[in-house]
Image: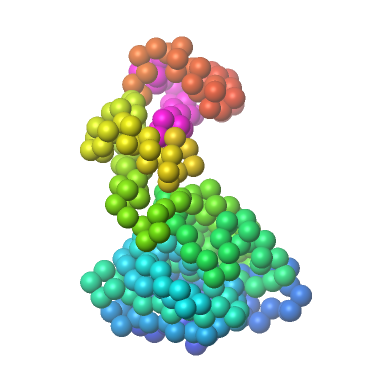
């Protein structure tokens, strides 16, 4: 990428940053283009105060806490918060000094920008939350990597990844009570634990016990805040693990089923087919 000075709207009050910028002045009739983006870790005095902004922006809090004021309305920033702003949207962003913000952002313009917000399920000047944070962070990191290359493919990749990011945000959005609250934080903790230990969790009951909640309460948490039931979430994770083992190893289907806690290989096969539409043996034949 050419050695250019960073745009003036990038904050200097950061301890570290990975940023990229492409065409900061695209034609007015551009369908959709990513102009810049990155990741920033805040200094204690980090503060952004703007009455407007020349581009549309989506930001994601990856760590820490802070405060956001959008069009005069105050919101708490914490891990998983996603928010947007753009032309005509006043906004103030500050960090907690005790738990400083680390956040991703992507700025874009174009006549198709409203479709990006619609796909993400957020409005311009809106705030939401996402679960399974690593899945959203993965796409932001892809945006940064390809944007920093600044080669002939960066612009098209940026638009494609922006559209993918919007869909990932929509797929991972979770509802929450106003102001967050203990049940929502418990839900996030349970999701994180289940995602990390899916290989050894054989039932929703075991997952609930290891998360320190009752099975009924775990079900309520997923019903209130998630897009799937706890059972569906765990089953999908276990079937994804099974698919990887079928693809990467030559272990017998029965052995893979047993390794994932399925004592009945026929039940395992039925579950696999219900998830992916084909049997484990048919899936393996696709290698």
Q: Nearer the viewer, residue 203 or 70?
A: 70
Is residue 80 depicted above or below 285 in this figure? Answer: below
Give the image quarter of residue 124.
bottom right
What residue do we see at 41% from left, 77% from top?
A: 93
The quadrant holding residue 96 is: bottom left
Q: Is residue 81 above or below residue 53?
A: above
- Asked if residue 214 lies left or right of residue 67, the reply is left
In the rendered image, residue 11, in percent from the top left (x then y), is placed at 42, 82
Q: Which residues are magenta?
A: 230-258
Q: Is residue 233 magenta?
A: yes
x then y, percent, for residue 126: 52, 66
Answer whether residue 152 is visible to the viewer in this image: no
Farthest right residue?
29
Q: Quadrant of the N terminus?
A: bottom right
Q: Position of residue 17 (x, y in %)?
A: 39, 74
Residue appearing at x 39%, y 21% in the figure: 256
Residue situated in front as seen by the camera: 254 or 29:
29
């Amino acid at each position: 990428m050419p050695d250019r000075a960073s745009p003036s709207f990038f904050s200097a009050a950061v301890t570290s940053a990975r940023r990229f910028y492409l065409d900061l002045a695209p034609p007015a009739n551009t369908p959709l283009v990513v102009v810049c983006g990155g990741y920033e870790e805040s200094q204690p005095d980090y503060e952004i105060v703007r009455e407007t902004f020349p581009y549309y922006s989506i930001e994601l809090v990856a760590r820490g806490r802070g405060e956001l004021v959008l069009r005069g309305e105050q919101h708490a920033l914490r891990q998983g918060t996603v928010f947007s702003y753009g032309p005509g949207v006043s906004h103030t962003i500050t960090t907690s000094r005790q738990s400083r913000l680390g956040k991703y952002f992507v700025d874009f313009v174009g006549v198709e920008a409203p479709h990006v917000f619609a796909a993400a399920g957020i409005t311009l000047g809106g705030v939401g939350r996402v679960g399974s944070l690593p899945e959203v962070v993965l796409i932001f990191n892809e945006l940064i990597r390809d944007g920093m290359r600044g080669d002939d493919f960066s612009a098209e990749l940026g638009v494609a990844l922006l559209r993918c990011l919007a869909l990932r945000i929509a797929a991972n959005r979770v509802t929450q009570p106003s102001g967050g609250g203990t049940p929502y934080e418990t839900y996030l903790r349970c999701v994180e634990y289940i995602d990390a230990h899916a290989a050894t969790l054989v039932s929703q009951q075991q997952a609930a016990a290891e998360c320190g909640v009752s099975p009924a309460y775990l079900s309520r948490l997923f019903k209130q805040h998630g897009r799937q039931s706890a059972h569906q979430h765990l089953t999908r994770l276990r079937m994804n693990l099974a698919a990887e083992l079928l693809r990467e190893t030559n272990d017998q289907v029965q052995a893979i089923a047993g390794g994932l806690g399925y004592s009945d290989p026929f039940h395992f096969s039925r579950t696999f087919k219900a998830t992916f539409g084909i049997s484990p043996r048919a899936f393996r034949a696709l290698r």
